[in-house]
Amino acid sequence: MDLQYKHKTQKSNCRRAGVVKKTRVILSPEAEEVYRHLNRQAEKSKTERTILNGINNKIELIKENIHYGNPVAKKLIPEEYKEKYGITNLFRVELPNYWRMLYSLVDGETKIEIIAFVLDIIDHEKYNKKFGYKRK
């Protein structure tokens, strides 16, 4: 099954100022790679299955409420994301086993669509490294 197609076809509504906006969740190539890896391992590993189920549940919550995740302060957004994707906002969602999913909200191709673009699905160690947090 094509993961991107699956998420593109699952849409929900977001109401703003009386206008119904559709929400799509799209994965970056990096996030899609992690998602596919977890999907392959889920049958054999309870840990991967738990993380994968968490991702799927959080995606559904984001479709219902685009601001579901915790907003990341603009000054804390990694330069990598700003340069690679040109994002100006970032949200963090906690997943099982201390994993994190990071997404940004962008306008869709039409004025009646919002895209929640999942930039990364990463473990806690990679998250800390990406944001410059150090161990005590």
Image (cartoon, rainbow, N blue to C red):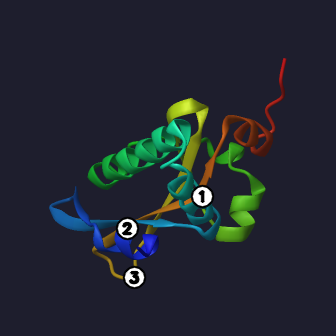
| Mark-to-mark CA distance, 1 and 2 | 17 Å
Q: Are marks 1 and 3 in contact (CB under 8 Å)?
A: no
Q: Residue 76 at what x, y percent from top left?
A: 70, 43
| Mark-to-mark CA distance, 3 and 2 | 16 Å
Quarter location, residue 99? top right
Q: Secondary structure at mark 2?
A: helix
Which residue appears at 43% of the width and 75% of the height?
Answer: 2
Q: Residue 37 at what x, y percent from top left?
A: 60, 58
* Left or right, residue 79 beside residue 50: right
* Left or right, residue 63 beside residue 28: left
Query: In front: 44, or 83?
Result: 44
Query: In front: 84, or 125?
Result: 125
Q: Which is nearer the N-term, disc 3 or disc 2?
A: 2
Viewer-nearest of labels 1 and 2? 1
User: Which dot marks residue 109?
Assistant: 3
Residue type at mark 1?
His
Q: Which residue is mark 1?
A: 37
Q: Which is nearer the N-term, disc 1 or disc 2?
A: 2
Which residue appears at 20% of the width and 59% of the height?
Answer: 17
Q: Which residue is mark 2?
A: 7
Is disc 1 surrounded by few (<14), some (14 to 19) or many (20+) residues within 10 Å?
few
Q: Is residue 94 visible?
A: no
